[in-house]
Image (cartoon, rainbow, N blue to C red):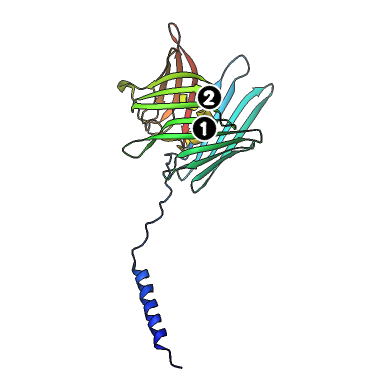
Amino acid sequence: MTIPRVLIACLLVGGLLTACQDEKAPQEPVPQQQYPTLPYRSLTLSEVFRGDAQPVTLTQQFDCTEGRLTRYTARQSVQASDERVLLETTTDLFYQDSIVTATDDRGNSCRYVLNLDGYATRCLLNEGTERQRSYTFDYLVNTEHRYYLRSVVERLADGTEHSRITIEWPSYRQMLLTHTVGGATQLYRLTTTPQAEIANTAQVPCLFLTELHPLSEHLPALYGKLLGEPASVMVEQVEPDGGRLLSYTYQLDGNGWPTSVIATIATFATSATIHTVEYQFQ
C-alpha cells in the first residue's frame, strides 16, 4: 500500500517538532528542602529540685537522627517512701517535606510548617481534644543566611493574641527581648561581655529562653533548631527592666562544650543559686 505524500509530510514535521522538544534547555530543578542540623546524637539535661518535700530529679533527653531531632523524652523521678516514682513523657518528631509533626504519648501534637531552609514559620498546637492554639514565627536572616528568631506570637482558638516574644539583635553579644502575656509586658536585656565570651559550639539554646512562655511550649522545636539558630555565644546575664539580675556560670569540657550551668539571681547583698543544670552529650 502506498503512503500518501501528505501523510509523509505530516510525519516528517511531527518528527522535527519532537526533536526540537527533546533538545530544548532543561527546566530549573525544583528547590530541595534544606534544614539545620545539630552537632550531636543525643543531649541529656538533668537537674535536681530540692524543697520541703523529697528531691525531684528532672531529666530531659533530646535524640537525633542524621542531625535532626527525632525524639524528646522528659522524666521526673522522686523517692516516695520505699519506692521511686517515675513519670515519663515522650514526644516523637516526624518529618515529611515541609511539615514536622511533634506528637507526645498523651495525645498532644504540634504541626510545624517549614520554609525552604527548614525553619518553622507557623505551628498549630492541639492539646488533646480540649484546646487549640496557633503560633507564627519570624526571623532575622544574617549575611551567612542563618536564621535567628525575631518574634513568636501565640493566638488562642478564637484568634485572640495571648502572648508574644519580640527579640532585637543589636550584636551577637546582645539580645533585647520584649515579653508580653495577657497584656502585661516585661523587657529583658540578655548580654555577654567580651571577657566572659564562650562560643556556643554545642549549639544549645539559652536556658532563659527555654523557660519563657510561649517558647517553653516548643522545647523540641527550640532544641531542634526549628525556631532558628541559638546565639553564637553563651548568654552570661539576663537583666529585667526593674528586676533582679540573673547570671549564668558555665563549666566546660575539653572541647568547649558545657557540662553544667549554674543560674544565680542577685539579692540585696549577695546572690542565690536558682538551679544547676547538668549537660551530657553523645
Q: Amino acid at mark 2?
A: Glu
**Is residue 278 something one can see in this rendering?**
yes
Please indicate whether residue 137 sits to the left or right of residue 134 in the image.
left
Residue at the limit of the structure toward the bottom, as seen here = 1
**Is residue 69 something one can see in this rendering?**
no
Q: Position of residue 248 (x, y in %)?
A: 42, 20
Residue position marked by numbered label 1 in the rendering = 219
The answer to which of marks 2 and 1 sits earlier in the sequence is 2
Q: Which one is nearer the viewer's eye here, 223 or 56?
A: 223
Residue position marked by numbered label 2 in the rendering = 47
Q: Amino acid at mark 1?
A: Leu
Residue at the limit of the structure toward the front, as seen here = 6
Establish if 20 lies above or below 11. Answer: above
Disc 2 or disc 1, which is closer to the eye? 1
What secondary structure is found at the residue carrying circle 2?
strand
Q: Position of residue 65 (x, y in %)?
A: 49, 44
Q: Residues within 10 Å of mark 1 (few under 14, many from 20)?
A: some
Q: Position of residue 156 (x, y in %)?
A: 57, 30
Residue at the location (31% across, 37% down)? 143
Q: Which one is nearer the viewer's eye here, 204 or 34?
A: 34
